[in-house]
Image (spheres, rainbow, N blue to C red):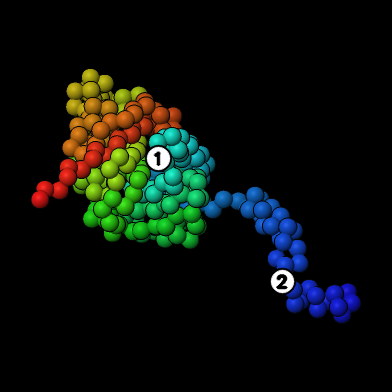
Amino acid sequence: MNLAKLLYHRLIPAFVRNPFGLWRRELLRRLTRAPQIPPAPLLQRIQSTATASEYLEVGQRAAESVSRIIVLSIPGTPRLLDLGCGPGRVLRHLPELWEMTGVDEFGDAVEWSRRNISRARFVEADPGGPLPFEDNAFSVLIAVSLLPNLEPSRRENVTVEAARLLEDGGLFIVSTPGLAVLSAFDPTASPTELRRAGILRARSGPFLFTAGGLDALFSEHFDPVLWEEQGLDGFQDLSVYRRRPRAPASG
């Protein structure tokens, strides 16, 4: 290489010399780079298995279901909060242009997400609140697999906090196991028992829900919009609620 060419390559940045080539190499690097996967102990605690494929595939299916509803219902750029986001299983698959925040009480999940998922910001906090956000801060809240793992008092706290954070007309999208998968969680429980109770703790630990049980939980602040049996990922039921307009302030 002659002196002039050597100086050219040393003094002129690559993005000026060959911007298309640089972009092409960066795109190739992104396409061929293996996705970042949380460590096995974190996966085991969050999703009850340490399987990377479940983390990626279930997150992808959940994101597709959530995106379909949001795109059809929310004008403009959604302002989305993921309650109980874990290591970003759903957020990593949602559109980068959306304004997204994830909240989780487990610090290691939040720290991993901050290091590996750039399309959202992550906050360590109890999803039941109080959360460090203004009233009406979001147009969409999602809670994937959160409610089944909360005791009744914490479920109520999540409901109240969701009502505070959502703007009028905003969507609350939740996933819960229900009648279709009752036997997988509790072979001894009967569908009649779950239908009568609306919300039932399975012998294996988590709570299961009917559409009526969720309607009763959210009735103070939300109106039901949609319920799809196993509609989230082919396993959990998908429910959508709309924040009821607040009453005008008196005086």
Residue extending farthest left? 251
Disc 2 residue type? Answer: Pro
Secondary element under disc 2, as helix, strand or loop, is loop
Q: Visible in this render: residue 40?
A: no
Q: Is residue 57 above or below residue 198?
A: below
Against 130, residue 237 (above or below) is above
Report the front residue among 227 and 189.
227
For the N terminus, the image quarter is: bottom right
Tag in front: 1 or 2:
1
The spot of residue 58 in percent (x, y) is: 47, 38
**Mark 1 highlights which residue?**
74
Q: Give x and y (percent) for residue 191.
A: 26, 21
Relative to 95, say whether 189 is above or below. Answer: above
Q: Where is residue 222 in the image (x, y as percent from the top left)?
A: 24, 36
Q: Dividing the picture into quarters, in which one does residue 233 lie?
A: top left
Q: Residue at x 25, y 33 (%)?
A: 223
Residue at 42% in and 41% down: 75
Disc 1 crowd rating (10 Å Cα; few below 14, some 14-19, many 20+) is some
- Where does the image place residue 195, in percent across and percent down from the top left? 23, 23
Number of callouts = 2
Check the image and name the residue furthest to the front.
Answer: 251
* Number of other residues with Cα within 10 Å of mark 2, as a class: few under 14, some 14 to 19, many 20 or more: few
As rendered, which of 13 and 198 lies closer to the eye?
13
As rendered, which of 37 and 5 lies closer to the eye? 5
Q: Are marks 1 and 2 in contact (CB under 8 Å)?
A: no
**Identity of the residue drawn at 28% across and 43% down:** 168
The residue at which mark 2 appears reads as 13
Q: In which quarter of the image is residue 124?
A: bottom left
Q: Nearer the viewer, residue 178 or 4?
A: 4
